[in-house]
Amino acid sequence: MSNRAAIAILIYMMVQAVAFGAGVILVLATPLASIAMTLMPYVVATTLIASAPLAWWIAPLVRARHERKLNAQDPNRGHDQPPRGYHFTG
């Protein structure tokens, strides 16, 4: 499993939780509340599906932020050196 996939899996859970919360608020805090029991399965399914591409898009951004932090801590670290950190197998 690549680093991007591992990071995306962790981010997926958080993105899905936030998207689900937004969907629930959208359904329950609007006039849609009268048909909330019908709409909630759609909210669940939509957030499960829509969160995967969002997490896949966010994962490299998180990795880049981590790499910038490592480079700031060690100014002599160049781009030709192997990455440090999480499960690098070289």
Image (cartoon, grey):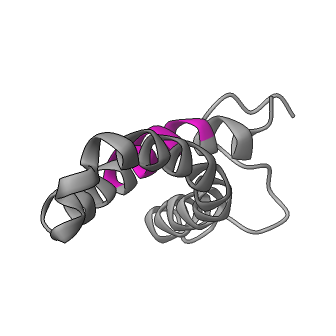
Q: Quadrant of residue 28?
A: bottom left
* Image quarter (top left, top right, bottom left or bottom right) of the C terminus: top right
Q: Quadrant of residue 27?
A: bottom left
Vertical side of 26 occupied by 40: above or below: above
Magenta segment: 9-18
Q: Is residue 11 magenta?
A: yes
Left or right of residue 41, residue 59 in this image: right
Vertical side of 64 occupied by 85: above or below: above
Which sits in the foreground, 32 or 75? 32
Task: Identify which residue is drawn at 74% across, 33% down.
Answer: 88
Task: Identify which residue is drawn at 17% across, 70% down.
Answer: 31
Task: Identify which residue is drawn at 66% across, 61% down.
Answer: 60
User: Magenta region's main secondary structure?
Assistant: helix
Which sits in the foreground, 45 or 90? 45
**Percent from the top left, x then y, of residue 84?**
65, 44
Left or right of residue 28, residue 58 in this image: right
